[in-house]
Amino acid sequence: MDDQSGTTEGRLGRRQESEEAASSSRTDSPVPKIPLIRPLVNRRAAVYQIISNFISSYAPSNSSSDEVRPSVCFAPQMYGSGKTTLGRHFREFVLLNRQVLEKYIIGFPGIDDTGVRAGERAVEALLNETLYVNVDLRPFPDFKRERFKSTLIETISKEALSTLPNEPKLLAKVLKNRENPKEWLKSLFQVTNKRYLFLFIDEIGLLSSGKFYEFPDLDPQRNPHKPNIYRLFFEILSSFLVLPYVSCFLAGRSDAIITKQKDAISSRVNLDFVRLDPFSEETTKLFIRGMKISTGETALQLLFPKHPEGHDWFFKQVYNYTEGVPLYVRHVMQVLVDTCVHNKLYNLTEDEMYARIEEISSYVVYSTTPMNMNPNTLKVFSALLLSSILEYEFQVFETVYGGLVLGESSQYVLDIANNFGFYYQYCPNKGPGQVDVEEQRIKLVFPKIVFKAAKKEYRDYPLMRYLDCLFPLNVPAETPSSLGFRFEVIFAATLYVRCCLSRRLGELSIFHESFVEDVVWEIEKCRVRTVPSFHSELKTSYSAKEQSYSPNAWKEFYDNCLSEDGVFLPNRPNSNGPDILVRVSVRRHDSALSADESGSSLDQVAMDTSSERTRVYLIGIALKYYNRSTVNVGMIKEEVDKFLIPVSSQLDLKENDIWAIQLVVSTSYNNEVSSHFTEKQNWVMNTGVYYERRFEKKRPSPGAWQDASSSNSDKEGLHIGPNCQLVVCSVDNLKDFLGQQVYEQLQKVYSDNESVLMKLDPLAKLLGRNLERLWRSDVPMEPEPSQMDIVSTRTDADEMEVEDVSKERVQSATPFDWKTFLREHCGFSDEEISYCLPKVEDIDEDELPAVTKQSLKDIGIDKPTLRFKIRSAVKGYLSRKQRKQ
């Protein structure tokens, strides 16, 4: 790592410090912020989708205004997905995709040309004949005796005419027709010399805030024909969209995405979810490479002066930490540039940069993951998180049933996921042709940078620690053959949590009669992590690119990956090694001989000369649960070949006091294997050779183990080496470990129906049942019952939404959430929130009626505009609350 501070400081010497320091846990002092100029990343699919919806609104079947049913694109994704960038720079995106649009557009409203020239004329119209207007609902005017529709028309007019020299005169002319939308739009086009209007309305999620209920045409109580404010909004919007020619794009995070679509349909508007996936790894790389500062230098030149093109490992680190979400890619790069330049740290190594990235915290202001989750809510969140890690695919309109949150009604997965702060991406279509919107499949995305902020609340909760270790996980494509790996992840979660809650491993029935039955595993040593898998085709011992080891490299694997106790999950299907590994160590005295040695050939092994030593138990678990066929002796031999045989020959078990246990788990065995399960016990084989005839055991001489590295398939019988043990778990003990309900549910993996390992609802139930002992255990983080009702379901004939009911039940004991209030009700920026939050956060909800402009001034809010917005938002909030009561 070289210090290039001399030249870099010269280049950056004149830059001004920002008011808000960049986040970094390495230092408490503010770090000067070096503004990054971000490139515009192409969103071709979204651009084409918005244009296609506009064209379909004015298709021949919708030729008259009475028949027009406008199609509107809606981006409800979480903060930082690129919604605002797409809307505000739409014309630039059209220009960026000019050639593609000219090729694929074959018809356009208001243009008679068809065929080859239609695309050229359409793009020409979009670039030169279209009026682009952005309306942000955050600074939207308050109610002043005007209806929302009139106020919206005035806002659009002001925005459209703001750049013209004679704006006041033209505005007065246009607003003469504000009560007649058709004449208003006609006059607007006339004075601007345009034919089309592209209307981008941002932050529509704020419609549910207090101030918009003050508009009489948005208040459901004054408009009983529409049960909620969004249906009234879409009714107003449709009156514009039926006019020639208006294209509309809506954006704003929503907790009820699917519900909004129903609201729109009831008001003659078709709502189409715009595709704004997180960036792919390759796009993230291009995005980072395009980031510059005001001097023209790229961010990569500042971070890696010796390698200004960057490193592939660096792009992958940023992608893995942010999942390609634009907001967090930008945030991570901003923090890295600020801190590395400020601290004169350049050309960091891969490990040094990884440590820096992992310390970067997320934008807390954008976090929506509920805190103080109760077991029910935490179960749903865990299921969603695990489904995102396992890359579950589900349909846009898929629901979750059975009281997963309080209440027994179903809820849309997408609504619940958005409430918890998940992002999502669309899955490639399977097969030719277009997929109907109801068949379109999506995957959830939850960036590690966000999870790290959320898990702080639950760091004592074993399942959260387990899920944390799975970032990132190399999950195979969702096919029947990938079910095994998904089950391994779920089984490992159960094993880890149960180990954390057990005093000794013998409490878990799968370990009955094994060497570790009486071993006490201290909870602080019970860790979990992912490790590389084994790959039989590797010519070298280890491949960093593939994150794999050769089966001949167990010594290196053990030293590098198994140096501490824990549960270890291979980061991809491990066809050449165990599905799960467990390492447990115990301190032992020379004189101590446990019962696990009494029946083995190691009774006479010489003891260490030291008075105390460490014994390691290494357990390789083979999960045959998801096999179509019953498990036979041949399958068991194959598992022994993948673990006990190479471990025996490569790890010097006796010298290092390592005891290797092969655990085979299945729901179905053939008669030959089942006959060995006596009185519901596991079938255990210690050191020796077990011949085929009823597996009669013959103890070999020490010389018989010189060829222990050879395969069992090449020998007669089953060979178990010194310091080794084979444990075949009985079906009864597996049922006891998983619980009867989970056991029965997982037996449906290969049923005719879609697998429970590929559906979210069964996964959530499985987690809930599988971890019942966790709910009942004395976990320090578990909240009091009065604070547990975070997510509930309310259902009526027309509306279903997720709401926070804890604030109503424990209002007197819960501080007012000023951060959310300032963001959503006041529409404040990050800087404004940082300025106001420390001054108002001590004001409780029952003190809100006493908040005045003067009191806000007295506590240090000096800016009149901020005082006015806070006071207005408080009035609206209290007014809405009173109406609800």
Image (spheres, rainbow, N blue to C red):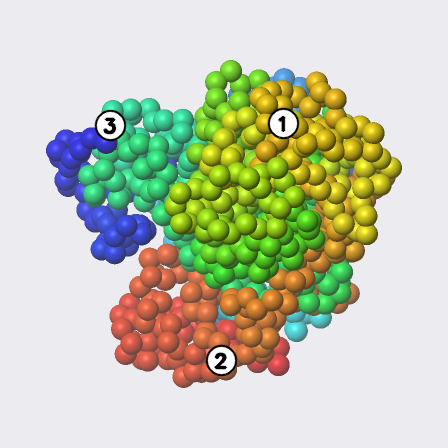
Whether residue 145 is visible:
no
Q: Which mark is residue 701?
A: 1
Q: What is the quadrant of the C terminus in the image? A: bottom right
Q: Which mark is residue 305?
A: 3
Question: Dot 1: what SS?
Answer: loop
Answer yes or no: do the residues labelled 2 and 3 have beta carbons within 8 Å? no
Q: Amino acid at mark 3?
A: Pro
* Distance CA(mark 2)–CA(mark 1): 73 Å
Other-residue count near label 3 (Cα within 10 Å), few / some / many at <14 / 14–19 / ≥20 = some
Q: Residue 811: where, in percent of width, then height?
A: 52, 79
Q: Amino acid at mark 2?
A: Ala
Q: Which mark is residue 813?
A: 2
Q: Residue 10: where, in percent of width, then height?
A: 13, 35
Question: Dot 2: what SS?
Answer: loop
* Distance CA(mark 3)–CA(mark 1): 64 Å
Q: Nearer the viewer, mark 3 or mark 1?
A: 1
